[in-house]
Amino acid sequence: MTILPRPTRAGAAHTPGAARPSGTRPPGRTALRCVRRAGLLLVLLLPACGGTAPEASPVPFTPVADTQQLMATILEPASEVYWDAVGWIVDASGTTEIRPGTPEEWEAVRNAAFVIAESGNLLMMEGRVPDGGPWMGMAQAMTETAVRAIAVAEARDAQGVFDVGAEVYFTCTACHATYAIQTLNPADRPD
């Protein structure tokens, strides 16, 4: 087996295993030692600096809509799109199935589910939480249910959209029964 010489840092040839001129190191080893030393230095100095990252300042959210406006302008329209996407009409002429028929219609259903999911997050923002009661859990349940709504819409599963749509509805009515009982019977609302 023949071992070919390789160039050293200065450009002179060096045969592996042969003696090196004094003061020279194989290429790359010097850089590796520098990296190791820098890493060791960081590990030793980091605790001396306090060892913790500075606290991030809070992101300045500015709620624009109050809870009723959020419900009326964002959450309710998206929920209606989702709920109206799938169903059946049974009449004297038979049964008519309602379901998205095009990729664009399925995308609209999926987008509505995203709006519902993110609305749960919006309901948890400071200024919208009415008390320390079950509000946060109900808002989180809305987001979790809507994540499933997104999944069945992306799968183009009409029965899944119908079933998860019912879960979204039950999540909404549970919250309304606690915080907005007047919305459960619209006939009782003053005009």
Image: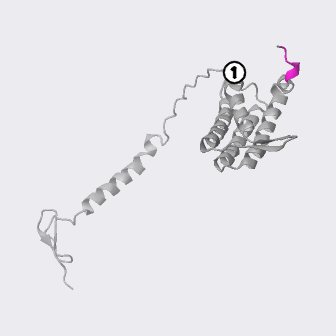
Q: Is residue 119 magenta?
A: no
From where the camera sits, is residue 121 visible? Answer: yes
Q: Is residue 43 left or right of residue 33?
A: right
Q: Residue at x 21, y 86 (%)?
A: 1
Residue 182 point in image, percent of width and height:
85, 22
The structure residue drawn at horizontal position 66% and vertical position 26%, both measured from the top left corner, is: 126
Residue at the disc numbered 1: 69
Q: Main secondary structure of the magenta part?
A: helix
**Secondary structure under the numbered disc 1 in the rendered image:** helix
- Report the front residue among 38 and 119: 119
70 to the left or right of 183: left
The stretch in magenta equals 186-190
Quarter of the image where one finds residue 6? bottom left
Q: Nearer the viewer, residue 179 or 150?
A: 150
Residue 123 in view of the camera: no
Q: Quadrant of residue 171?
A: top right
Q: Position of residue 75 (x, y in %)?
A: 69, 30
Residue 189 placement: quadrant = top right
Quarter the C terminus occupies: top right
The location of residue 128, given as percent across then percent down, is 69, 24
Q: Report crowding for label 1: few under 14, some 14 to 19, many 20 or more residues within 10 A (C-alpha).
A: few
Residue 72, given in percent of the width and then of the height, sits at: 71, 23
